[in-house]
Image (tube, grey):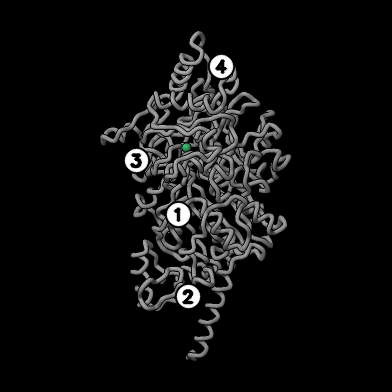
């Protein structure tokens, strides 16, 4: 028979182990690995909408065993891929990190350039002499950079995505590798910014012809109905479309990406170094499909459920390789998406599709009629609805300075139906109304991109002739999930205010390193297990009298009755968390770790003048 003293000692040991395991510090390699999963265009309501259809271990690893923030919104208006990915890892908005669009007009080069294209580099892994890409436009550093600085480079930082911008911006300046695909062939590439040739494992991956197994396949839903096939398609110019278009809008593209991620984890030995490593995986396929099919389609539902299973397999793989107790995971997205205008209009919600190309022609006609009636001039060089990029040269010929030129374009935008506009000139001076909306546009400002105007669109107006889009200040574009899994997090559903800028700041705090240079997020203390909260909050805010109970004062162990009291207090405070499950999930994570010990082993289109690449 076991003595009470011995069982007490065993329990004490377990508690001490839990505390030791949950202590995070980048310097001593705890956790061994942080994985940030960005699902491109995973709108904030999807996880609730499909929650009862998810299996175990995928999204529900975070929803049921992690800290899930249901009310996370970007607090800016330029909700698209490059700004979103920069925001998540810098903890800042465009006004801090400088990335305010996927592409913009370069007044020196006199053409549209992408957020990451860098003519001083070359692509690596692709045939030809194409220009490469780098984070050279970033004006702030990232979580990965701070990890690198804090550990004198011992931490290793990688990011992958199908899209270049979604890999490069999260990897920061000091990333060991950013990998994305060549759209034509589907082969993985990087740029000379990172290295002069692909690592052997990535070369082997490309040489193994793995793209072929995803071509000419049928994607079926749970009932066996064929949703799409990945047969060769033709692009707008009647040429073969290539891997990105043929496969990119199906779950096979995520399979392909996660296959690459597994090899990266294995061959780069992530999670086995002396410091905490960071891996960012941005799943691009969800965005490619979402634009075409719309958020309310059976296809997006099937894609989301497929992503759930794919993530479950990937998390399982990480559990076996590294042990889930040694990993912190975050899940979020770069932006949401508007309903398809045709779907919204059927419900009598005002919504419309139109051509951004025609809109730009119309604006130039309005401006030409007013400023140079004898000749048509291209005053607006690019329109990624609702952002307009101006030609400084064209306005110089009619002797207009920036302030007047941008106002003229803004008025033309209003004339064709936009609700308002913000000029770069005004944004640079911080000249915005002191309102919630004004702040969103202030946060959207960047000194990059020459002269520009950000139009304020009417809701559900989409600058594409069919399909749907994002890039608005409205909730359907700003609302994204934010969820964490790992020992420092108190499992529960949190309905408190959260923003994507909180992700990097919370991780930095838990790791004991500096937040990224321009970070403005807050540490999500309400979701942290007691060991990770500020000391003073435990001592000062506690009030056991029943009034003014502070969530920051949750004690480390919950007897059943007290846990129930805390839960009801939390509901009042807006949080619906289940502190009692902390121990269970920590214990589960521990047993996962034991298992592991036993088994150890919006596409970047060409720089188009008009249109969108989200
Ligand atoms: Zn997009």
Kindly report which numbered mark, 3 or 4, lies closer to the viewer in this rendering: 4
* Label 2 lies in ligand 1 vicinity (Cβ under 8 Å): no
Give the mark, 2 or 4, whose residue is nearer the N terminus. 4
Residue 403: % across, % down: 54, 28
| Separation of marks 1 and 2 at Cα, in angstroms | 24 Å
The residue closer to the viewer here, 389 or 317, is 389
Other residues around mark 3 within 10 Å, as few (<14) / some (14–19) / many (≥20): some
> Mark 3: which secondary structure?
loop
Can you tell which mark lies on residue 556? 2
Examine the rendered structure and indicate whether residue 127 appears above or below residue 72.
above
Mark 2 or 4: in front is: 4
Precedes in sequence: disc 4 or disc 1: 4
Point out the frontmost of discs 3 and 2.
2
Q: Position of residue 567 (x, y in %)?
A: 36, 69
Q: N-terminal of the two: label 3 or label 2?
A: 3
Left or right: where 463 falls relative to 317: left
From the viewer's side, name the closer residue of 497 and 394. 394
Q: Which residue is mark 3?
A: 296
Helix, strand or loop at label 2? It is loop
Name the residue carrying label 1: 498
Q: Is mark 3 within 8 Å of ligand 1?
A: no
The numbered dot on residue 409 is none
Residue at (41, 35) in percent of width and height: 228
Q: Give me the disc on residue 398.
A: 4
Q: Is residue 146 left or right of residue 473?
A: right
Please tell me which residue lies in front, 490 or 396.
396
Q: Is residue 375 above or below residue 326?
A: above
The residue shown at (37%, 78%) is 545
Disc 4, SS: loop
Specify few, some or many for label 1: CA neighbours under 10 Å numbering under 14, 14-19, or 20 or more: many
């Amino acid at each position: 028979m076991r003595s009470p003293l011995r069982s007490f000692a065993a329990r004490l040991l377990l508690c001490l182990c839990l505390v030791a395991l949950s202590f995070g510090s980048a310097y001593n390699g705890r956790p061994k690995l942080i994985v940030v999963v960005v699902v491109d265009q995973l709108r904030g309501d999807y996880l609730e909408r499909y929650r009862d259809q998810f299996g175990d271990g995928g999204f529900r690893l975070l929803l049921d065993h992690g800290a899930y923030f249901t009310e996370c919104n970007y607090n800016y208006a330029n909700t698209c891929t490059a700004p979103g990915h920069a925001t998540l890892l810098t903890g800042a908005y465009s006004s801090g990190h400088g990335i305010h669009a996927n592409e913009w007009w370069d007044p020196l080069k006199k053409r549209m350039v992408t957020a990451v294209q860098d003519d001083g580099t070359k692509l690596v892994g692709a045939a030809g002499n194409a220009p490469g890409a780098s984070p050279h436009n970033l004006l702030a550093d990232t979580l990965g950079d701070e990890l690198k600085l804090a550990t004198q480079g011992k931490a290793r930082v990688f990011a992958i995505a199908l899209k270049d911008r979604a890999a490069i911006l999260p990897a920061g300046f000091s990333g060991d590798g950013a990998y994305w695909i060549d759209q034509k062939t589907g082969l993985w590439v990087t740029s000379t910014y990172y290295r002069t040739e692909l690592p052997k494992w990535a070369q082997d991956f490309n040489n193994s012809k793995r793209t072929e197994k995803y071509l000419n396949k049928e994607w079926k839903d749970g009932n066996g109905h064929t949703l799409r096939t990945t047969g060769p398609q033709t692009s707008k110019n009647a040429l073969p479309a290539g891997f990105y278009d043929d496969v990119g809008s199906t779950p096979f593209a995520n399979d392909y990406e996660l296959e690459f991620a597994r090899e990266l984890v294995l061959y780069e030995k992530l999670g086995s170094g002396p410091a905490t490593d960071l891996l960012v995986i941005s799943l691009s396929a969800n965005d490619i499909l979402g634009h075409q099919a719309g958020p309310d389609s059976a296809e997006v539902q099937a894609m989301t459920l497929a992503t759930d299973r794919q993530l479950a397999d990937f998390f399982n793989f990480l559990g076996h390789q590294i042990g889930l107790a040694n990993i912190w995971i975050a899940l979020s997205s770069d932006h949401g998406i508007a309903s398809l205008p045709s779907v919204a209009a059927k419900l009598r919600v005002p919504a419309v599709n139109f051509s951004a190309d025609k809109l730009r022609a119309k604006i130039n006609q309005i401006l030409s009629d007013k400023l140079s009636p004898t000749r048509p001039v291209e005053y607006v060089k690019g329109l990624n609805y609702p952002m307009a990029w101006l030609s400084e040269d064209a306005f110089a010929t009619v002797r207009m300075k920036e302030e007047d030129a941008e106002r003229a374009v803004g008025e033309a935008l209003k004339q064709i139906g936009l609700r308002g506009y913000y000029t770069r000139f005004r944004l640079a001076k911080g000249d915005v109304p002191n309102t919630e909306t004004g702040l969103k546009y202030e946060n959207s400002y960047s000194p990059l991109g020459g002269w520009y105007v950000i139009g304020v669109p009417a809701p559900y107006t989409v600058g594409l002739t069919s399909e749907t889009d994002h890039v608005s200040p409205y909730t359907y574009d700003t609302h994204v999930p934010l969820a964490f899994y790992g020992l420092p997090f108190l499992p529960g559903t949190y309905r408190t205010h959260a923003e994507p800028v909180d992700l990097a700041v919370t991780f930095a705090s838990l790791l004991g390193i500096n937040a990224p240079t321009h970070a403005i997020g807050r540490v999500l203390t309400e979701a942290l297990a007691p060991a990770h909260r500020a000391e003073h909050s435990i001592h000062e805010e506690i009030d056991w009298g029943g009034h003014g109970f502070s969530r920051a004062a949750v004690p480390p162990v919950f007897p059943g009755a007290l846990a129930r009291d805390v839960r009801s207090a939390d509901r009042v405070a807006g949080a619906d968390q289940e502190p009692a499950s902390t121990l269970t999930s920590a214990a589960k994570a521990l047993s996962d770790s034991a298992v592991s010990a036993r088994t150890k082993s919006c596409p970047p289109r060409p720089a188009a003048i008009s249109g969108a690449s989200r």
